[in-house]
Image (cartoon, rainbow, N blue to C red):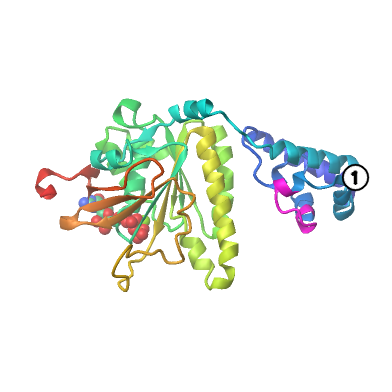
């Protein structure tokens, strides 16, 4: 492709990106002046990310990518701009923390465990066995986020990425009706993307900034489940690093969205109980605790006595570890009634 053609194509791509103007660049291809064609040439030349590109010699890019010198200089300048470290003072940081809001889970005990509910500007990972209630909690949050502030909501909307085909409109309607919302409107306020492969999941997550720009009321992102497709596709250890890298990209996109737009991110992760583990955590996640280091809050869910559910807060940066019991009922997530607490 000729240089001119590339420039032309770039202009189109830049225009298109205008819709996600406020979102920070995360990938070489997102930089102004760089489209996917140039991005892959840059990568092939050994510059894998924006930081690497920021320290590149423009002349090396001219050679390796067959682009003009002005273009190369512009790209490196943009990469430097984009990779500036954004320090903020402790005071600014504190101010930002003050804007954190919480979505009620439906159970007061669980809210208390989480410091008030599921937090914005954070990723909350809920892991547990099949049927432990991970999706049920997601349904509840997708409804509760729509409630007014005084009722534990954010007067907001939700985005839901469904990787297992387990989104149930009827369940949303049921819970919404209990909460006094118009069930159809509640469904209308949730944007659902069904992912059929891990690549598709990555694409859908990449689309979220656009959705948020179109609808600033979006305050909750659900990924149910985060790992199912990655697990299914990446079997065998040989590809684990590759998988991990993709998962990390998704998680960092989610974290940036959470920070930037004051959104709560709730992701689920199915783990299998390992009967061979007698002590410690019996659910050492198959494939390792892949997302543990990025998620700010990690909730381990398990079935408790008399059909109850027990949530355990694991590795929280600011809250004490502890447990809370609740119940999944036809009306949604509720505190245990007095009888069952005994
Ligand atoms: P996987 O997706 O398989 O990993 O499980 P999960 O953790 O997402 O489980 P999910 O949230 O789907 O929980 C399913 C459980 O919730 C069921 O086994 C029921 O115990 C309970 N449940 C779901 N719907 C209802 C309902 O309408 N009424 C009551 N009482 N319980 C329900
Ligand atoms: Mg589920």
Dividing the picture into quadrants, the one containing residue 265 is top left
Badge count: 1
Counting from the top left corner in percent of width and height, residue 35 is at: 75, 46
Residue at x 17% of width, y 45% of height: 336
Foreground of the two, 162 or 334: 334
Residue at x 29% of width, y 42% of height: 113
* Residue 332 seen anywhere in this rendered image of the structure: no
**Circle 1 SS class:** loop
**Label 1 neighbour load within 10 Å: few <14, some 14-19, many 20+:** some
Dividing the picture into quadrants, the one containing residue 4 is top right
Q: Quadrant of ligand 2?
A: bottom left
Apparent side of residue 319 relative to residue 331 in the rendered image (left or right) = right
Indicate yes or no: mark 1 CB to ligand 2 under 8 Å.
Answer: no
Counting from the top left corner in percent of width and height, residue 195 is at: 51, 55
Counting from the top left corner in percent of width and height, residue 232 is at: 49, 67
Q: Which residue is mark 1?
A: 68
Counting from the top left corner in percent of width and height, residue 11 is at: 79, 38
Residue at x 79% of width, y 38% of height: 77
Magenta-drawn segment: 42-52
From this view, report whether residue 155 is shown above or below residue 4: above
* Residue 241 seen anywhere in this rendered image of the structure: yes
Foreground of the two, 144 or 53: 53
Q: Quick check: is 51 in the magenta stretch?
A: yes
Apparent side of residue 262 relative to residue 48 in the rendered image (left or right) = left
Q: Quick check: is 245 in the magenta stretch?
A: no
Dividing the picture into quadrants, the one containing residue 120 is top left
Foreground of the two, 79 or 137: 79
């Amino acid at each position: 492709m000729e240089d001119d053609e590339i420039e032309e194509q770039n202009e189109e791509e830049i225009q298109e990106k205008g819709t996600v103007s406020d979102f920070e660049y995360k990938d070489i291809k997102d930089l102004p002046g760089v489209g996917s064609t140039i991005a892959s040439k840059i990568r092939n030349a050994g510059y894998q990310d924006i930081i690497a590109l920021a320290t590149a010699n423009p002349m090396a890019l001219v050679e390796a990518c067959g682009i003009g010198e002005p273009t190369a200089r512009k790209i490196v300048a943009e990469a430097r701009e984009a990779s500036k470290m954004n320090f903020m003072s402790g005071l600014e940081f504190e101010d930002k923390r003050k804007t954190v809001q919480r979505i009620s889970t439906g159970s007061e005990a669980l809210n208390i465990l989480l410091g008030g509910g599921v937090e914005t500007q954070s990723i909350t990972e809920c892991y547990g066995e099949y049927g432990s209630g991970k999706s049920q909690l997601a349904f509840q949050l997708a409804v509760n986020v729509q409630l007014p502030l005084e009722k534990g909501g954010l007067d907001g909307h939700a985005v839901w990425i469904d990787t297992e085909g387990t989104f149930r409109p009827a369940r949303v309607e049921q819970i919404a009706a209990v909460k006094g919302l118009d069930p159809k409107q509640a469904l209308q306020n949730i944007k659902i993307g069904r992912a059929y492969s891990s690549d598709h999941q990555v694409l859908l997550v990449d689309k979220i900034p656009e959705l948020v720009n179109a609808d600033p009321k979006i305050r909750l992102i659900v990924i149910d489940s985060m790992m199912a497709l990655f697990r299914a596709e990446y079997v065998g250890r040989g590809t684990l690093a590759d998988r991990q890298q993709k998962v990390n990209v998704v998680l960092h996109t989610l974290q940036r969205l959470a920070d930037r737009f004051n959104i709560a991110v709730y992701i689920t992760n199915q783990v299998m109980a390992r009967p061979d583990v007698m002590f410690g955590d019996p659910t050492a996640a198959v494939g390792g605790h892949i997302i543990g280091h990025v998620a700010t809050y990690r909730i381990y869910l398990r079935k408790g006595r008399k059909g109850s559910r027990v949530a355990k807060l694991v590795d929280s940066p600011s809250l004490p570890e502890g447990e809370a019991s609740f119940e999944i009922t036809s009306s949604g997530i509720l505190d245990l009634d007095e009888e069952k607490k005994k």
